[in-house]
Image (spheres, grey):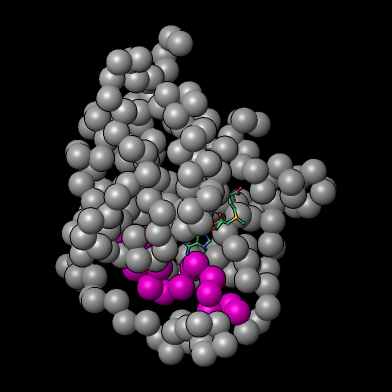
Amino acid sequence: MAGRYRCRRNDTIPERVVTISDPCVPLDSARLFPQHFPLEVEIGAGTGRFLISRAQSHPAVNYLAIERMVGRARTLDRRASAVNLCNVRVVCLEALYTMYYLLPRHSVRCVYVFFPDPWPKRRHHSHRLFSPLFRDALWHALATGGRLEVATDHLAYFKEIRACMTLDPRFREIAPMERAPEEQTDFELLFRGQGLSIGQCAFQALPVENEPPLAPMTLPPEMLPKKSEE
Ligand SMILES: C[S@@+](CC[C@H](N)C(=O)[O-])C[C@H]1O[C@@H](n2cnc3c(N)ncnc32)[C@H](O)[C@@H]1O
């Protein structure tokens, strides 16, 4: 297939689901992917409709999916294998931890967050992805000038994400990307099919003078698991 990066039939294709042997050692992109290309990350990639389409049309970019549900990570892996993509890997882990500890500093060109779980009940809002800790990890993972792309059908959550990102001086709002129909995610197809509006926004990481180190993660009490949820 001209213009697409496919493994040759006899290449040994490394497992696309990344094995984390030491959760304290950051991932090494040079060892994860066969070729050194810019790295883009999708958080909560689900079964990978967006990521796989993107990886096919952008063969000179490496794509890392973070998806905590094993079944979805496996399906994404299967879908990537079916089209023989070498530039896709999936980490089956919690996104905050992965962003905080496993992505090397300023190594990512773009982070995609499409249809993050909205946790609509007020008492569950602390489970939402866009916490101050997540913004710290996001800024440290993104290269200067790197982008965050967000889309969600949950307009109250969209407003909250946009507000917290706008107030954070380490980011500036930019125009969101345009996505081809084949780059719409599985949840997006469902929501668009129901006639729901979709909020989209994007932000760029700015340089910060005297960059503060990323302190060891301490979860605030509201983010700790409650007895009834353990
Ligand atoms: C609503 S689904 C959207 C899936 C996909 N982005 C789409 O639009 O079709 C949210 C996905 O994010 C994953 N997810 C939610 N929170 C996560 C977290 N903290 N770490 C990793 N994955 C997460 C869920 O397992 C689920 O697959």
Quadrant in the picture for the N terminus = top left
Examine the structure image and report whether residue 136 is included in the region drawn in magenta: yes
Quadrant containing ligand 1 reads: bottom right
- Residue 59 found in image quarter: top left
As rendered, which of 57 and 179 lies closer to the eye?
57
Residue most extreme to the top: 2
Name the spot of residue 192 as percent of width and height, x first.
Answer: 76, 45
Main secondary-structure element of the magenta-colored stretch: helix
Residue 54 against residue 120 in the figure, above or below: above
Q: Is 194 placed left or right of 228 in the picture?
A: right
158 relative to 39, above or below: below
Instruction: Residue 136: give x, y in percent of width and height.
Output: 34, 68
The residue located at (35%, 28%) in the rendering is 86
Q: Which residues are magenta?
A: 124-140
- Image coords of residue 97 (percent x, y): 35, 66
Going 51% across and 33% down the picture, which residue do you hit? 79
Residue 174 percent coordinates (x, y): 49, 49
Comparing 202 with 105, the one in front is 105
In this rendered view, identify the residue nearer to me: 95 or 69: 69
Position above or below: 192 against 84 = below
Res 214 seen here: yes
Is residue 58 visible in the rendered structure shown here? no
Picture quadrant where residue 181 is located: top right
Q: Is residue 83 found inside the magenta-colored segment of the image?
A: no
Which residue is located at x 37 percent, y 82 percent?
219
Residue positioned 53% across, 50% down in the render:
71
